[in-house]
Amino acid sequence: MKRLPSWTAPAAVAAAATAAFLPALLNGFVSWDDGLYLTDNPGVRGLTADNVRWAFTSVRGGSGSR
């Protein structure tokens, strides 16, 4: 029996993942929590040292927020 090339299994996994998640690319934003986490969030205003520090040290709207 002939052996398959070594790239066959990774290519099959990549094809399956692409097929599974491709429909998600056709969706836009869902505005359930975009305001809370993204559009009205002052911590998401550019990539600065303060914003990166804020991202790793604060909780906003998650299950851990009070």
Image: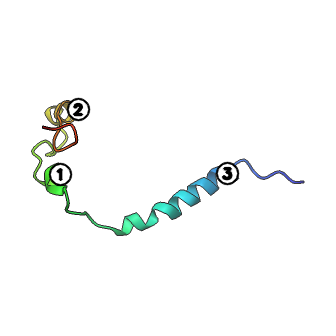
Q: Kindly give the residue lying farthest to the right in the view shown.
A: 1
State which tag comes first along the sequence, 3 or 2.
3
Q: Are marks 3 and 2 in contact (CB under 8 Å)?
A: no
Q: Measure the alpha-carbon separation of dots 1 and 2.
A: 15 Å
Determine the residue positioned at 36% across, 69% down. Answer: 26
From the top left corner, tell me how far across and down residue 29 is, in percent: 25, 63
From the top left corner, tell me how far across and down residue 39 is, in percent: 14, 54
At label 1, the amino acid type is Leu
From the top left corner, tell me how far across and down residue 60 is, in percent: 16, 41
State which tag comes first along the sequence, 3 or 1.
3
Determine the residue positioned at 52% across, 64% down. Answer: 19
* Residue highlighted by disc 1: 38
* Residue highlighted by disc 3: 9
* Residue highlighted by disc 2: 56
> In which quarter of the view is residue 62 placed?
top left
How crowded pointer 1 is (Cα within 10 Å; few <14, some 14-19, many 20+) is rated as: few
Quadrant for the N terminus in the image: bottom right
What label sits on residue 61 in the rendered view? none
At label 3, the amino acid type is Ala
- Please name the colour scheme applied to the rendered image: rainbow
From the top left corner, tell me how far across and down residue 40 is, in percent: 10, 52
How crowded pointer 3 is (Cα within 10 Å; few <14, some 14-19, many 20+) is rated as: few
Asked which secondary structure carries label 1, the reply is helix
- In the rendered view, would you say 23 is above or below 38? below
In the rendered view, does 23 fall on the left or right side of 60?
right
